[in-house]
Image (cartoon, rainbow, N blue to C red):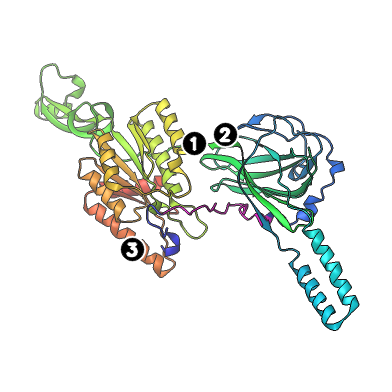
Amino acid sequence: MSDGDRSDEPDGGDPESGRRPERSDGGADLEAAASGSDATASADESTAGESPESGAVSGGAATDVAAGRSAADEESEIDEGSAAGEAGATTVREMHLVSTNHWVGVATVSFLTAGLGVVLRSRPLFLAAVVGVGYLAYANATEAPEPSISVTRSVADPDPEPGDRVRVTVTVTNTGDEVLSDLRIVEQVPDAIAVVDGPARTATALRPGASVTFAYTVLARRGRFTFEGIDVIARNVSGSRERVLDLATAETTITCLPGLDATDTVPLQGLTSPYTGRVSTDSAGEGVEFASLREYHHGDALSRLDWNRYARDGELATMEFREERMATVVVLVELRRAAYLQVGEDGPHVADRSIDATRRLFNSLIATGDRVGVAALAPDDVWLAPGAGPTHQAEARRLLATHPALSPTPPSGRLYVPGYLKTLLSRLDDDAQIVFVSPVPDITSAYIARALHVRDHPVTVVSPDPTRTDTPGRTLAAAERSNRLASLRRAGIRVVDWEGDERLAEALERARRRWSA
């Protein structure tokens, strides 16, 4: 890994002050709304006279898209009537006035012309300067309007599956008394989801009571995403002054829960609970794997007798088998800032792979009858005590999809490792073992795995590999990670090195063969 593939900030790097990160659709650049604005702002109001039909409310925002309307019509439409449903009130979070400097050239030419007219005593030049001053007076005669608008927003499916395309429709209505002659609107799309069709912005002019509707499509991914604001630029008629506003709107939420698919059976270690399960132990008793022979006792089941020995030696002996017990497992996923490594320049963060692996491991362990819990090595507290059954599985599914600490974006807080270990150890049952899902980005990860292992909680590390070897720097980073994994193996910790182009089931099977060799 090169420096560009890992976070330069420490685990608890300070958040960027007051600066909203650029969204995936480029919506953070308000000036981008000006692109093509002349064509958009001159939308023919006479062709948009019909009010959109009223629709279903999703996430608190009213739908304002009529059935049967084409996608092209939805992109930008002026509505003379009132918006369908109850209009969504907005709250100004931030506002400031700026000068566009569009008339600086006119001012410069006017003053130069006036100066030349005076120096050369040229009446035509002087009159030309007077005309320029007239234009400047026109440009500065009015102030940028302070818009009063309402916003309604709807989504086609508030509970999509991962990978679904979700249509988002936004309607903005001028609820004030003045004409907004030049209005730019930019949707505040959540940072972690991508716009795949249609720009999440528009530019238009609105008379009092008029509305504009635009729509775009986002690609659903695991998590809960809230749309809660828009950016607005309102300019005066001459375009010399503009008012920039950050408006809070009614919240609209998309919740995308991951599926219940599991990986292959997870190899566990011998520490178990007293309940019957699938993990073989060293204790002799009921089971399916042969353990030993003992002398026959009166009352032993005939099915447990070793009839081959009786036929050979004439002696009765009873076979014993390894007892199979239920395991108590906590899947611990690392979500410190250092774990948000990126595979290549355009690849996803390895934290996404870690969270997906946590979900698959959890579902696999639940399916085999083990008691399973979830924890996260993160600044925010994430804990689901070990349990079993469909209700527990549904609770874990929702936690892995919606908990803020499992966001696709790196955390800004700092984790105090000794305090975290103390809290985690107090929560663990005596017979609990750990499946630690981590790319092992630094020595802190290795320290945590060893600290849990030496406290009689067997640890299995499942490590998604974020490294590449296409540059000397990345090759060195890959070697450092390999050394950390080797040190864990020397400490008696099982390690599954999960390569980037490999399925999790393949990595588990490869590790299982190595452990049984």
Is 193 left, or right, of 285 in this rendering? right
Residue 17 magenta-drawn? yes
At a point 76% along the width and 64% down the height, the residue shown is 103
Query: Which residues are drawn in magenta?
Result: 14-32
The earlier-in-sequence mark between 1 and 2 is: 2
Calculate the distance from the C-alpha at mark 3 to the C-alpha at mark 1: 35 Å
Q: Secondary structure at mark 1?
A: loop
* Residue 159: assigned label: 2
Q: Is residue 353 visible?
A: yes
Residue type highlighted by circle 2: Asp
Residue 299 magenta-drawn? no
| Observer-nearest of 462 and 420 | 420
Q: Quadrant of residue 154?
A: top right
Q: Secondary structure at mark 3?
A: helix
Q: Compared with residue 183, is residue 425 higher up or lower down, i.e. above or below? A: above
Q: How far across and down, in percent of the image, does residue 240 sit?
A: 74, 59
Residue bearing the label numbered 1:
259
Q: Compared with residue 180, is residue 362 higher up or lower down, i.e. above or below? A: above
